[in-house]
Image (cartoon, rainbow, N blue to C red):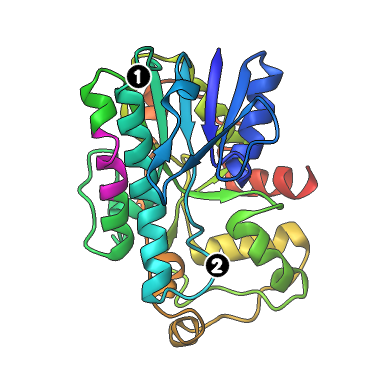
Amino acid sequence: MKILVSGAHGLVGTALQQALSAAGHEIYRLVRYAPHSESEIEWSPDRYSIALSRIEGFDAVYHLAGESIASGRWDEEKKKKIRESRTRGTKLLSDALANLTQPPKTLICASAIGYYGNRGDELLTETSPPGPDFLSEVCVEWEQATEHARDKGLRVVNTRFGIILDKEGGALAKMLTPFRMGIGGRIGDGKQWMSWIALDDVIGALQLVLAKDALAGPINFVAPNPVRNAEFTKALGHALSRPTLFPIPAFGVRLAFGEMADALLLSSQRVEPGILKEARYEFRHPDLAGALRAVLNG
């Protein structure tokens, strides 16, 4: 296939390109700078600009671009960037694809389990309603921004990513230094659920979604066995052969990270990969201990 990818330099985008290229697909990238090669296509969500002629004739589009939510405190300017980088960029791309003479058959757009908000022990599926907080609002608007493409007949998939495990980036990479120093520990009371997924399974499931035309709408990208933060902490310490004796109280996390602490570190989301299970996706790393071994030794 001829495939267009945004967010191609991010954690998921980089690994996805490698997998798609290895499978024989022809990959093009949306970039925000002057293109360096024929396979790069410039776009500017800030200026709401994209060259329609350059995005004609693709078979599928993976839209993965968005401001990092885990870097820097969430002041009003940061929150504006988080929201607009997702909603504005997605609407631009959705509108553009819907107006093509030769639109792609499929648009696979990133989303996140932040959609559900802080839900305690509730088991969450793709049909669960959204939460009431900032990230929930962003995810709802993010997914709604694909409506124009869906209305024009594109198959649209909204991939609700959980905590992606990889030693080179994302949440796990940020945890490794304190845990390797032996100063890692649970966060808050450690009872909050963490719905995680190994990067290998993210890429495998993204390829499955591309291949299965029946899949559309929101899909939870999480492993089938979520764990509480205390269990995650213990498993990571064991994988690194380090003690985990230094819990961080909730007030300390909030003092250090502000609003982001409640949304990302103290929030509880027990998410079920219902649609991936129904599609018979075979998880390479269904259990946390095995996933951490694979990720850290890979």
Q: Which residue is nearer to you in this view: 6 or 252?
A: 6
Residue type at mark 2: give it.
Answer: Ser
Indicate the secondary structure of the residue bearing disc 1. Answer: loop
Q: Quadrant for the N terminus, please.
A: top right
Q: Is residue 145 magenta?
A: yes
The residue shown at (43%, 87%) is 251
Coordinates of residue 283 in the picture (x, y in percent): 55, 31
Mark 2 highlights which residue?
Answer: 71
In the rendered view, tell whether residue 157 sits above or below residue 132: above
Residue 13 left/right relative to 274: right
Does 248 sit left or right of 276 as displayed?
right
- Residue 116 appears at what percent x and percent y? 29, 53
Q: Is residue 286 visible?
A: yes
The answer to whether any part of residue 267 appears in the image is: no
Kindly identify which numbered label has been placed on residue 100: 1
Name above or below for residue 134 compared with residue 150: below
Q: Residues within 10 Å of mark 1 (few under 14, many from 20)?
A: some
SS for callout 2 = loop
How many discs mark residues in the rendered view? 2
